[in-house]
Image (cartoon, coloured by chain):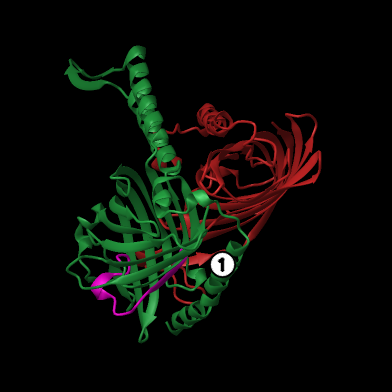
Chain colours: A red, B green
Amino acid sequence: MFTSFFPYLPQRLWRAVPLLLLASLTLTALPVLAVDKENHGFGLDRTFAVTGAYGFGKRQGMAGQSGLLRAEGAGYFMTTPMNNRGGLEGGVELGYDGLDHNDAAATQGFLWDLWLGFPVTLFEKQSDDEMLFTSAIAPGMGISSQHAYVYIKGKVAARIVPKVSMELDYQWTPYMGSASWDTNSAHAGLSLATLRYATYFAVGDEVSLMAYFDWRQSNLETPTPGADPALQQFSGGVYNSGSFSPIVRARWDNNFRIGFGVAF
Amino acid sequence: MERLGQATRVGRRNGWRTLAAVLAMSALVTWTPREAAADSAVSQLMSYSVMTGLFMEVGKAEYSGGKGNPGMPVATGFRYYERQGIVTGTLTAIAIVLAGAAAASSPKSQRTYQSGNYIVTETTYRSEAEQAAIVAGAAAGAAGAASAKNQSFDLEIFSRSLGGDVSGWRMNGYYGIPFADRFMFELGMGFGSIDTAMKKDSQEIYASWGYIGMPFRFNYANDLFILFLEAQWNWLGHTASAKADPLQVPGTDALLLRYNPILPWKIGVVSNMFGRLYGEWDISTPGITSLEFATKATLGLRF
């Protein structure tokens, strides 16, 4: 299945692990290298985080409980004449999706996700010596064990008390912005919407402990059984609710994650 | 079949969502501070800026099936437009690095011959020095592409949930050549995939469009606005799908159109008169001689 998309990817996915690690280091290093201390893009005060998470609930194409490691970074290094800041975000997630489920054949239980985005700040509020509130929007793209995708993310971060801040972000991949690996229709998409709440507890000038909870909804498009293959091929990108359509959508699945880690 | 019509009418009624979103953004503008440095449209053309907003396009756009489509499609969607930024350069850099890595790890030569009872394949691999040279060359190219000052990136996501008939996406990355202080010529690479589903006089109409090609854009900035003329050379048009003939698919009486015009043009204007409020309006045609036109308006916020 994967070899048809990545002819150079080894048949056994575990061989891709070093490749993914290298790519993730490159991606997450980009914002970290590019920013100075004033231009944190992760939460209010940080540029890089390593977290571990436990996931549960249902997800399209995969099921059940998962264990995940996630490394991500974000930072700004350009300023517009209107005083908005632009930069990069990126990261990698590696995990095992087989803690309880019986559908591991699709990925041999191996979960991975690799993404790169371009955040730009919208509105910010600053006191004399620290950032109090920031909001940003980021288009981006990625590949994961489920699909190749584009996303749009909105995020806000705010200081609660001097040593504690929070961040809320919402990331959306529409059907049309996704090319799913595991269907036989070239157009079929996987829609994903993730809402994440994170809290940062500063334990020094440079380090915060981070805890987060996320809720992701997913829905998969698949070809309508019996629909004409030529028609499926032709206009698979168009879905009409309640009418003739070469595409059907499943119910929305809900998956939840709880994660802890360190942000630098 | 009739139910498609209902769905489309409901979609049209939901156009109020677009209006509400536009009004909400306009309200945001009123309390958003603005720096004096951004006053001129020349500055908007020549310095780093980002626009996010919504667009609506009505008429025979290049993706709507051409003359074969008797209807008047309406497209709505979300747009992200960055000038003098980093997106195009970063994506180019990644592509160069991946291509370099693939080239460095590929065999230098391979030959197969028969020797006695055996067929022998000899593969010659590159030396470490040769591999290093290729990777270093790719890295230098990537660094140059990423740090180029004059680059811009335009992403449009077409969504039916905003009330239109059209679903899909298009993105263009450009590198620019500025001259005479107020002009910039840009060229680059673009991709897209857009599908239309609509109904006219109880006839179902589907149109499908794909785009891989090169955009060319010429900009002129005045103090108040930017004028632009753009052509998007679609390489996919150099196939059978360059004709606007309807397809026949057994099992349906729907009108199926696959049409990729080779050289659609657009001419437009970007306003710089309302501070953070970004307004753009253009008229486009799938081909100069087609006598078909579409018009598109974008309203958004500048950052």
x and y, in percent, of residue A205 in the image = 76, 29
Q: Examine the rendering and report whether any part of residue B86 can be seen.
A: yes
How many marks do you count on the picture? 1
Q: Examine the rendering and report whether any part of residue A1 can be seen.
A: no
Q: Nearer the viewer, residue B213 or B299?
A: B299
x and y, in percent, of residue A251 in the image = 61, 64
Residue A112 sits in which quadrant? top right
Q: Amino acid at mark 1?
A: Ser
Residue highlighted by disc 1? B26
Residue B71 shown in magenta: yes
Residue A158 shown in magenta: no
Q: Nearer the viewer, residue A105 or A15?
A: A15
Q: Is residue A116 left or right of residue B98?
A: right
Badge 1: chain ID: B
Magenta segment: B62-77
Q: Residue at x 73, y 39 (%)?
A: A130
Q: Residue at x 35, y 32 (%)?
A: B99
x and y, in percent, of residue A94 in the image = 61, 36
A13 over B188 or under it: above or below:
above
On-image quarter of the C terminus of chain A: top right
Residue B76 sits in which quadrant? bottom left
Q: Nearer the viewer, residue B19 or A93?
A: B19
On-image quarter of the N terminus of chain A: top left
Q: Residue at x 34, y 64 (%)?
A: A234
User: Circle 1: is it few (<14), some (14-19), or many (20+) Cα within 10 Å?
Assistant: some
x and y, in percent, of residue A200 in the image = 76, 40
